Amino acid sequence: MCLAIPGQIVDVQPGGHLATVEVSKVRRTINIDLLEDPPAAGEWVLIHVGFAMNRISAERAAEQLRLLAMLGEDAQAMAELEGYEFGSESERGVT
Amino acid sequence: MKYVDEFRDPQLIKQAADEIRRLTDPARHYRIMEVCGGHTHAIYRFALADLLPPNIELVHGPGCPVCVLPMGRIDEALSVVERHNAILTTFGDVMRVPGRQGSPLERQARGADIRMVYSPLDALRLAREHPERPVVFFAIGFETTAPSTALTLQRARELAVTNFTVFSNHVTIVPAIRAILDSPDMRLDAFIGPGHVSTVIGARPYAFIARNYRKPVVISGFEPLDLLQSIVMILRQMRDGRAEVENQYSRVVPWDGNLPALRVLADVFELRPYFEWRGLGFISQSALKLRSAYSSWDAEVRFTMPSVQVTDPKAAQCGEVLKGVLKPHQCKLFGRECTPERPVGALMVSSEGACAAYFSYVHRRTAAVV
Amino acid sequence: MSTIAFPSALRFTDTQIEMAHGAGGTASRRLVEGLIAPLVGACGSLGDAATLTVDEVSIAMTTDSFVVRPLRFPGGSIGDLAVNGTVNDLAVAGAIPIAIVCSLIIEAGTPAEVLQQEVQAFGEAARRAGVRVVGGDTKVVEHGKADGLYVTTTGIGTIDPRASISSANVRAGDRVLITGPIGDHGITVLLARGDIDLDADLRSDTRSVYPFASALIGSVGRDLHWMRDPTRGGVATSLNELARDCGLGIVLDEDAVPVRDEVRGACELLGLDPLHIANEGQIVAVVAAAAAEQALAAVRRTPGGEEAAIVGTVEAAPAATVLVRAAYGGLRVIDMLVGDPLPRIC
């Protein structure tokens, strides 16, 4: 379910509910009411059925890729990595 | 494409696949359910099973909103078109779902005014452009899509668009997962959690799976590296004897969910006491209907719909495939009476349904390839 | 439509004609093989173009109907499609297109200006393609029928003696070539309908592919084993038909297939696969391995063919199947498309 695609905000339209988003040179007007606050041009959001669902965190994405790159390290380095999580320290929980 | 291509990097994929192999105990058989139809589709599209050792089995779960839609709901919507000269609007996914007298696509070809839309806002716009006719939006999807329907209804109320109604078939994912976990046939080790549903509901709703059933849950993105990384995380939990909820898709999934989305859902929708899920039977508190404040926009209130019970042919084993008990090709109708061109069950209609995906992507490969 | 051999065992027992019968999949096959061909006394094999010998001259003949909504779209209109579509069927049969006749079914109430534009487009397309329009017919039907305008075009050409185009020529090891970026036409028309509301700078690729066919035949002759213009159902459908006809497998290299950014973006947003999207100005060809580079160079030298690419290989197995290999090596099956591609949200 749930085909959602990353898109880049081009501009926020007057009125504050709509924005123009671009995905690989294709543009669409989307609704931004599901975001906590209006996005700025250049920000990346996840798009689903004409709505921006959430912002995409560049830091988290970079962190993930960094950890993935480290999977190729030798077993010694792997043991050290065991303490790390993919994501931040708050991303595990059994609440 | 940014945030897509980086997560398809061949070198990183190879490394992740190697790590999975290192973490897999050859003496053990792993059964991991991916709940979400989007994950089913991604696994097939990216041929990820090719990268996994043979003792890791990915089981397809019920997270395909088209697949679990009871057939009668299509007929109920189509009856409104006939009786009230309404325009029926819906997503492309629904167009080929078979009703008793044909799918929406077939009925459209025979003259019924059925229009495909990309967004519920397009349906609302259509209603404003045609004030003289009722416009019904056939809403479908899990919690990912429901907030968009909810916002559209708020807008319809704000603008007093009185000819617009929503026929809600939104369902919620947790009851379905619970039904799977409580099923006597259940033999699953872990879950790959639905990525986009979680952008709305966050990670907390899955806590009961880890706490009460002691199964690891990793919320995953949809690119190859996301799924592989999630499997790494699951294998590590299993190796360590842990059962926790983890968020692999943290670049978009907030641990606490999306507050504006949850607020708008609470404003517009409430849970039905029960709802029929194709293949899983009646599940309580598992589906959304419009609150009474929005009853003027509720198609089920505005129109008298015949309650259409359409049972699947006895031979169709949609339910067992949905629960992961049977593989698609083990259903007696698979590939014979039931094919993507002539689907009997909805798992063959939806491109993310386990049977359609299996048929298109796997079934045809009968020999090993270089 | 792929090559069909007769007599066939298929029976047509459907009680009513549905959209599926025109969609190009197994329902269409059942209609043609089970109902139409036996009743008209067809025999031998049926491809997109028929070949006949008249007084020792080999002639190719083809007919096609054109139905499109909207009539005009960026890059062309029904008038262009109606000429290029028929010229292209002749070209990929290995024929030199010579002449066409055109039948117009016009809906009453259509503005004269609309008809004029289409006939003008038709004439200009014919001039560009180098074919003569030698006849035609016009009918007017009641308002509500014909979506404005339906066009049927029949074309004839002479078979190029240097060419031998048949699925029977295809061998394991042959290479698959595409003349340019895929998906432009289908996505352009989808967006032009206005239901989806995406904005992209895209045009239909409608054009005569005869220059490319000629370049291929001229450069490698009989080492050009097979070609097709991948219209409805896209490259995937054409190659699936080939795989079924010759019983071999085809493996496409995903990264090698040329796709414009805009087409990729629209497909990702709508959940579509560019390999399933219609083209109206491309050739997908299969050439002997040793001749592949030469064939590619010839197409690239032809104006409009600069983005041609070798995109895959014919393999002995798996039989009758088309696979796509991703950059990291994963293989997935890609099936033929039945009906029109439907955007999805799930």
Image (cartoon, grey):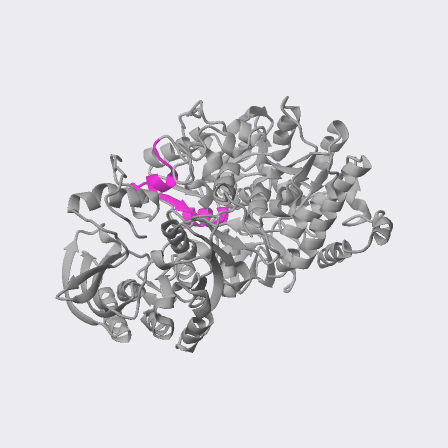
In the image shown, does C135 or C158 lie closer to the viewer?
C158
Instruction: Specify whether B273 is left or right of C210.
Output: right
Name the residue at the left extreme: C55
Q: Quadrant of the C terminus of chain A?
A: top right
Instruction: Specify whether B42 is left or right of B69.
Output: right
* Quarter residue C276 falls in: bottom left
Q: Is residue B87 magenta?
A: no
Relative height, residue B273 to residue C166 (above, below): above
* Quarter residue B105 falls in: top left
Percent across and percent down for residue C64 are: 25, 57
Q: Is residue B109 magenta?
A: yes
Q: Residue at x 42, y 78 (%)?
A: C301
Q: Quadrant of the N terminus of chain A?
A: top right
Q: Is residue B298 visible?
A: no
In the image shown, does C63 or B366 lie closer to the viewer?
B366
In the image shown, does A8 or B176 lie closer to the viewer?
B176
Percent across and percent down for residue C27 are: 32, 42
Percent across and percent down for residue C126 are: 25, 71
In the image shown, does A13 or B59 lie closer to the viewer?
B59
Q: Is residue B302 visible?
A: yes
Relative height, residue B160 to residue C265 (above, below): above
Percent across and percent down for residue C65 are: 25, 56
Q: Residue at x 40, y 26 (%)?
A: B306
Q: How many marks?
A: 0
Q: Which residues are magenta?
A: B101-128
Relative height, residue B323 to residue C129 (above, below): above
Instruction: Specify whether C165 is left or right of B287.
Output: left
Q: Residue at x 60, y 27 (%)?
A: B285
